[in-house]
Amino acid sequence: MTVHERRTRACQERLRERGAALAVLAPGANLQYLTGVAETPSERLFCCLLPPTGDPTFVVPELSSEQVREATWVSTVRSWRDGDDPVDTLDAAVDECVADAGRVLLDGTMWARHTLDVQSVLGGRTFGLAEEVLGPLRARKDETELDALRRAGAVADEVMTSLFADAGSLVGESEAALAREVERRLVDAGGEGVSFEPIVAAGPNGAKPHHHHGTRTVEPGDPVVFDFGTRVDGYPSDTTRTVVLDGTPSSEFETVHEVVRAAQAAAVEAVEPGVEARAVDRAARDVIEAAGYGEQFVHRTGHGVGLDVHEEPYVSADSTATLEPGMVFSVEPGVYLAGEFGVRIEDLVVVTDDGCERLNDSSRDW
């Protein structure tokens, strides 16, 4: 049994436990996780029907059918041609694999136009999200996934360390130029492109947690937030450091940086099996609030990382998720002072049997 079939059978067990009649998967991480098919959403109906027993069925455009057959262990692939009504093909496939009138779980990434097609065939049923069965499965990574995540983390660390080494030559460059440089170095170090658009935020732009890099140049004394990652075998890295490439920053920056570094260390220390995710968030938040910057910590402490850069578990103040071995997530507290600077430090961690393992080890100094 392949790893993808094994995951599919585990998902089907969860479907049976919940009394679901069918899961409908769209192009994206859920489909890739269960079948091995990596596909980009488009205007053409492309889905996989997963009943609680038996084998899945693909419904795909004819122009994709051969690629799908080559990429997956799933043997049943029904196709439709341009000019046909794909709903007819979908209707026939549903008749073959849906045996009861239970709930239908739809992939949360399915485009609205395709959701309407599915609902037209399965009208009158109760619908939910496939993530309720797939989320817990994907949250615990197997050794193949962990190996890819470790290697992706190592590539990101190598690039971050190279930026430190070349710091002096990077002053005077624009944020956009530095973002392009990060992308180039990630590929040169063995990564598969970028896992998301790199964040390079200099000076006051660092106070915007999701700043889009622009034309501002990095000046001596500027704090610069670097947040980036790459992919290895489809799995991403995601790391953040806040550095001063040259010159002397303000004394408040030095204070805030030390607060954030202490908060991140406290949160990582709190990670172990059986702990609720919100306790990790609280560990970071306590340090930042005690230093007087609680109002400037404006986001959750972390998010799960897998085939998607953001997935379960989410490490937030209201999360009741219980940490289990194999879960991978970011730990990234931050403090943002509008008009001045921001500081964020981020590592990915994997929950182990007795604590956690960091997947990043580049310097956390400024």
Image (cartoon, rainbow, N blue to C red):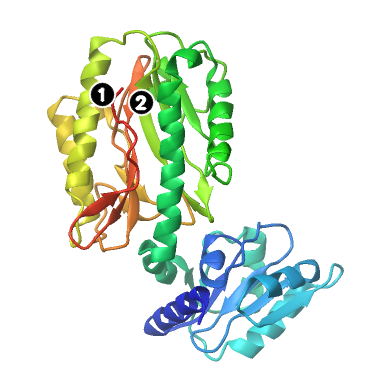
Residue 116 seen in render: yes
For label 1, the crowd category at 10 Å Cα-Cα, with few meaning under 14, some 14 to 19 and many 20 or more, is many
Q: Quadrant of the C terminus?
A: top left
Q: Is residue 160 above or below residue 85?
A: above
Looking at the image, which is closer to me, 243 or 31?
243
Q: Are marks 2 and 1 in contact (CB under 8 Å)?
A: yes
Q: Which residue is mark 1?
A: 257
Q: Is residue 260 above or below residue 26?
A: above
Q: Is residue 96 above or below residue 108?
A: below
| Residue visible at 56% across and 27% down in the picture | 181
Q: Residue furthest right?
A: 83
Left or right position of 216 against 19: right
Three-letter code, disc 1 = His
Looking at the image, which is closer to me, 220 or 91?
220
Q: Earlier in the sequence, mark 2 or mark 1?
A: 2
| Residue 248: % across, % down | 32, 8
Q: Secondary structure at mark 2?
A: strand
| Residue visible at 71% across and 66% down in the picture | 45
| Residue 216: % across, % down | 52, 14
Three-letter code, disc 2 = Thr
